[in-house]
């Protein structure tokens, strides 16, 4: 789904409804598949090696203290697969059990959110196939695989479709499309409903509807001119939030601000726009 459709909030809501522990993990351009499983603290290992060198420790002792597995920390899927072994491997680092009421919920299972997977390395999805398909993986420096114990985790993966995901990966997923209504009148009603849910009592339906009309008009122009990204629900909520914060409890001023602010919120490209704004009524 497009940005702002509520994909991330959906995952948190699922965890709350199922009374499961929740682990959100946001993928970025540097994320590799192993980061979702485990991470290796090479800096800490180097620091320890330098310390032992100054202390003139025995080689056998140094080798034991610098064993690779002692510097491996669990990632999201490790916590979700086997929380007990993740706790044992985590050392003194902070744990996800300290967030989201997870300490009281993890025995019910986990909901793991891998957010915006399309922003990661191209081989990230394929690198997770074995772990997700077999329900196990082997961390660096260990001969013992981490396997799913207890309640199998629910893994929610979001994408803005900025990059096509590998077919082999998609085939193993159940896909939920979060789409905006294609009909303009339906889209206006859809956005107004979301505006009410987010900002009830802070402005009027007239402001919600006028903001929706402006977005739908600019979205239509952008589609016709093949401009990307298209303005969507995220921009609509930003626009309504802006006029409410700039003119609280002043509907007349909020309406005037819509026309002034909307071009900066909704028009993501400098080209392809008409000289005057015409919004569908």
Image (tube, rainbow, N blue to C red):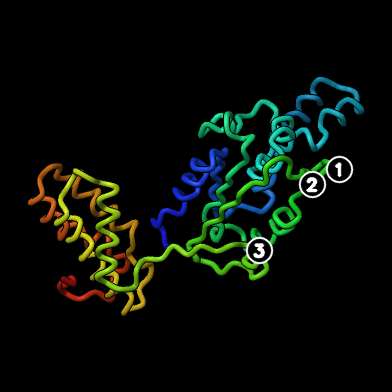
Eyeballing the image, is 256 above or below 213?
Answer: above
Check if mark 3's residue and mark 1's residue have beta carbons within 8 Å. no
Identify the residue shown where x is 66% and y is 45%: 77
Local crowd size for mark 2, using a 10 Å CA cut-off: few (<14), some (14–19), many (≥20): some
Among the two numbered marks 1 and 2 on one chain, the one whose residue lies closer to the N terminus = 2
Identify the residue shown where x is 32% and y is 79%: 225
- Kind of element beneath mark 2: loop
Find residue 172 and name its label: 3
Image location of residue 167, percent across then percent down: 64, 70
Image location of residue 124, percent across then percent down: 65, 58
Identify the residue shown where x is 31% and y is 79%: 224
Which mark lies nearer to you, 3 or 1? 3
Find residue 186 and name its label: none
Q: Is residue 127 left or right of residue 142?
A: left
Q: Nearer the viewer, residue 248 or 226?
A: 248
Image location of residue 249, percent across then percent down: 12, 42
Check if mark 1's residue and mark 2's residue have beta carbons within 8 Å. yes
Q: Is residue 265 left or right of residue 205?
A: right
**How far apart are the alpha carbons under marks 3 and 2?**
21 Å
Q: Quadrant of residue 207?
A: bottom left
- Kind of element beneath mark 3: loop
Eyeballing the image, is 239 above or below 103?
Answer: below
**How far apart are the alpha carbons under marks 1 and 2?**
7 Å
Q: Which residue lies under the disc numbered 1?
A: 143
Eyeballing the image, is 110 above or below 180?
Answer: above
Identify the residue shown where x is 60% and y is 29%: 94
């Amino acid at each position: 789904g497009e940005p702002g459709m509520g994909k991330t909030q959906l995952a948190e809501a699922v965890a709350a409804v199922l009374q499961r522990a929740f682990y959100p993990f946001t993928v970025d351009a540097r994320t590799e598949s192993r980061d979702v499983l485990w991470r290796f603290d090479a800096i800490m290992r180097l620091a320890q090696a330098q310390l032992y060198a100054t202390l003139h420790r025995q080689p056998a002792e140094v080798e034991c203290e610098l064993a690779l597995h002692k510097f491996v920390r669990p990632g999201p899927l490790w916590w979700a697969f086997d929380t007990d072994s993740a706790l044992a491997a985590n050392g003194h680092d902070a744990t996800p059990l300290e967030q989201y009421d997870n300490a009281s919920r993890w025995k019910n299972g986990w909901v793991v959110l891998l957010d915006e997977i399309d922003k990661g390395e191209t081989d990230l999805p394929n690198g997770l196939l074995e772990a997700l398909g077999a329900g196990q993986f082997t961390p660096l420096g260990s001969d013992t695989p981490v396997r799913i114990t207890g309640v199998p985790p629910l893994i929610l993966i979001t994408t803005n479709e900025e990059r096509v995901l590998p077919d082999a990966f998609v085939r193993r997923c159940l896909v939920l499309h979060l789409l905006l209504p294609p009909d303009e009148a339906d889209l206006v009603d859809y956005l107004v409903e979301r505006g009410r849910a987010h900002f009830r009592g802070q402005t009027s339906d007239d402001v919600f509807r006028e903001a929706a009309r402006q977005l739908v008009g600019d979205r239509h122009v952008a589609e016709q001119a093949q401009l990307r990204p298209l303005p969507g629900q995220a921009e609509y909520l930003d626009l309504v939030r802006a006029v409410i914060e700039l003119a609280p409890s002043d509907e007349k001023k909020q309406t005037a601000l819509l026309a002034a602010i909307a071009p900066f919120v909704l028009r993501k490209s400098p080209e392809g726009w008409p000289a005057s704004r015409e919004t569908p009524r």
